[in-house]
Amino acid sequence: ILVEDIRNVRLHKLETNLGSFQGTSAVKIPNVSAIEVNLVRLVCEKSL
């Protein structure tokens, strides 16, 4: 359960930061793992 809670907190961090990316071509989010970047990449590719 602890791992799931950590995952949910980190994904919430990404979701809240994604809302502020309007019209930017580069984004910096500190302390994001490669797995989290790939999750965001899939969502961004499908939204284009």
Image (cartoon, rainbow, N blue to C red):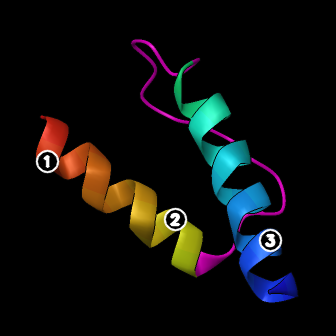
Q: Quadrant of the C terminus?
A: top left
Disc on res. 46: 1
* 44 to the left or right of 12: left
* 20 to the left or right of 23: right
State which mark lies toward you, 3 or 2: 3
- Residue 32's spot in the image, x, y percent? 72, 64
Foreground residue among 7 and 23: 7
SS assignment at label 1: helix
Mark 3 in CB contact with mark 2 (< 8 angstroms)? no
Q: Quadrant of the N terminus?
A: bottom right
Which residue is identified by label 2?
Answer: 37
Distance between the Cα atoms at labels 1 and 2? 14 Å
Distance between the Cα atoms at labels 3 and 2? 18 Å
Three-letter code for the amino acid on which mark 3 is drawn: Asp
Which residue is identified by label 3?
Answer: 5
Q: Main secondary structure of the magenta part?
A: loop
Mark 1 surroundings: few (<14), some (14-19) or many (≥20) residues within 10 A: few
| Residue reaching furthest to the front | 1
Three-letter code for the amino acid on which mark 2 is drawn: Val
Q: Which residues are magenta?
A: 20-34
In the rendered image, residue 45 lying in the magenta stretch gets the answer no
Determine whether 10 is above or below 35 in the image. Answer: above
Distance between the Cα atoms at labels 1 and 3? 26 Å
* 37 to the left or right of 48: right
